[in-house]
Image (cartoon, rainbow, N blue to C red):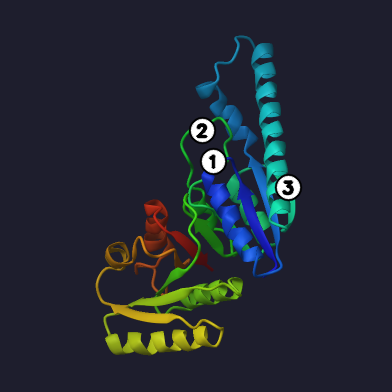
Amino acid sequence: MRKILLPIDLSDYTKTAFSHAAAMGKTQKIVIEGIVILDILDVLEQATTFFPLPQGKDGHLRKEEELVEHIRQLAVEEVNDFKSSCKKESIHCKAKIFEGRPDFVIEKEGIYNDLIIMGMRNFFHIETKKRPETSVKDVVGHTGTPILAVTKQYKPIKKVVAAFDGSNTSMKAIQQFVNRMTGMDYEITILTKNENESIAAEQMKQVEDYLFHHGVKKIHKRWISKSLRKTIEEEFLPETDLIIVGKHSKDAVTELFVGSFTKYMIDLNKVSLFIGH
């Protein structure tokens, strides 16, 4: 892995995302591309909700211009803080400021990177929205670049669960994770839901063999026939640091479909996710 895309906002989620990128930088030679995204049109639409604007067209326009200029200045400060953090960690970085819809910008820039690291929640709308957004779900549906979606609190990636359903997509997610976590020390549990235990055992054996030949030594296997969600919540949280999921499953009605299990885990926001494509 050589390049990581890091969308930046003023939240603790961004600090956590940066910590994960920095940890990867200690085992690999990477460049972090930090991007600040300003959705100017949305800012102006939201402005009257949070900032009373003067009466009259000229006063209104002047206030809008001041608000936009202030937000652009905050973006410059975010970029400078990001560069300073990279310098302290001795990490090579690039930084850009974009104006547009966050999900569109991340999708466009993501194709030039090996991995996107971003918060499970984000606050791209500087000073105009007090509640976090969940555009990570929008990004999942569009980009072909793997995403590491992180929780607010930083936890080193030590214990990993791979949600595997036997599909090409879930296996691709595992492959993408392994190839982007080179040199990092973690243990992984292959968690497979299948009504047929013997089929699940054979599938897990194949995954185990792949992991072993890519340098992963601490491998566990677990077959279940009950709810994947229930198993994760009752048996693996909060000890698990990260769950690997595929964007789609082999069957759109199974629990690993992006509209079901992955979005459920994003909404739950209790464990970081590696979302493969």
Residue 222: percent from the left, percent from the top? 33, 79
Instruction: Identify the residue position indicated by label 2 in the image.
Output: 129
Query: Residue at the location (73% across, 55% down)?
Result: 93
Residue 123: percent from the left, percent from the top? 54, 41
Q: Amino acid at mark 2?
A: Lys
Indicate left or right for 251 with 194 as reference.
right
Instruction: Identify the residue position indicated by label 1 in the image.
Output: 123
Q: Quadrant of the N terminus?
A: bottom right
Specify the farthest residue to the top. Answer: 55
Query: Pointer 1: residues within 10 angstroms few (<14), some, or many (20+)?
Result: many
Query: Residue at the location (56% across, 54% down)?
Result: 17
Instruction: Identify the residue position indicated by label 3 in the image.
Output: 96
> Which picture quadrant has residue 62?
top right
Q: Amino acid at mark 3?
A: Lys
Indicate left or right for 80 with 103 as reference.
right
Q: Which element type, helix, strand or loop, lies under badge 2?
A: loop
